[in-house]
């Protein structure tokens, strides 16, 4: 029942999110493409997905599918974690207090929004109109981002930005942080997405 990280080439996964009013005035579908190997169990509707994150290096992200949605697992670097508290004044919901039952389980209502500080686990769907944000882990000035960018995600549809904890910045179209799905660790590196406790 195990799943492997992306890039194993077993299957191409395409989800198109409709983005009315996307850049250029075109009601475009903004897809994201990745690969994954779903388990037989995971193919069943809503089944939890188990994944080993041992191969994930600091600064890397992998994507798995859970309930038809992309779930990102990011292994954050010490620098990325250290930047999080400094961003609080710039964020719409820095303490993850909005819609706690939908967006942030109790064990993720902390500065890192995670069970383990290193690993961010979030659903990669923008809380505005459902596009999938892009990785913007590189820090510093770059197009569509502030000069002091500390790393995070940029939604290509209408410019919402999220930090490395999936927290949305203020004054952006997206109203809420990215969803932290129910999850737990079965061992140091085996992660179960879709359940809070051992099955
Ligand atoms: S869908 Fe509009 S900003 Fe993300």
Image (cartoon, helix red, strand yellow):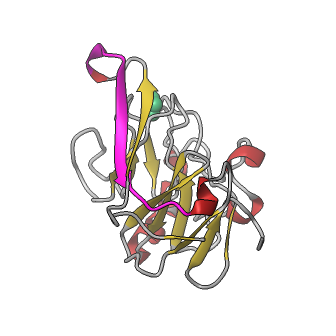
Residue plotted at (65% across, 55% down): 181
- Residue 94, percent from left and from top: 60, 51
- Residue 30, percent from left and from top: 35, 32
* In this view, 96 is above or below 126: below
**Can you see residue 75?**
yes
Residue plotted at (62% across, 54% down): 180
Quarter of the figure with the N terminus:
bottom right
| Horizontal side of residue 117 vs 100, given as left or right | left
Looking at the image, the residue that sits furthest to the front is: 40
**Which segment is the magenta one?**
24-39
Looking at the image, the residue that sits furthest to the left is: 142
* In this view, 174 is above or below 98: above
Residue 181 in magenta?
Answer: no
| Horizontal side of residue 127 vs 144, given as left or right | right
- Residue 178, percent from left and from top: 56, 47
Image quadrant of ligand 1 equals: top left
**In the rendered image, which quarter is residue 11 located in?**
bottom left
């Amino acid at each position: 029942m195990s799943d492997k990280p992306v890039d194993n080439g077993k299957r191409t996964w395409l989800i198109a999110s409709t983005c009315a009013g996307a850049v250029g005035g075109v009601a475009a579908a903004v897809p994201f493409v990745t690969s994954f190997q779903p388990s037989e169990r995971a193919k069943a509707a809503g089944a939890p997905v188990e994944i080993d994150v041992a191969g994930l290096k600091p600064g890397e992200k992998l994507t798995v599918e859970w309930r038809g949605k992309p779930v990102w697992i990011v292994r954050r670097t010490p620098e990325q974690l250290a930047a999080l508290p400094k961003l609080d004044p710039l964020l719409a919901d820095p303490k993850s207090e909005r819609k706690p039952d939908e967006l942030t389980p109790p064990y993720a209502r902390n500065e890192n929004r995670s069970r383990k500080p290193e690993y961010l686990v979030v659903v990669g769907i923008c809380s505005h109109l459902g596009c999938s944000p892009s990785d913007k882990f590189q820090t510093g000035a770059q197009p569509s981002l502030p000069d002091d960018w500390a790393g995070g995600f940029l939604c290509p549809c209408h410019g919402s930005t999220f930090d490395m904890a999936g927290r949305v910045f203020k004054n952006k179209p997206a109203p809420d942080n990215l969803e932290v799905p129910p999850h737990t660790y079965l061992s140091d590196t085996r992660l179960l997405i879709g359940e809070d406790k051992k099955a």
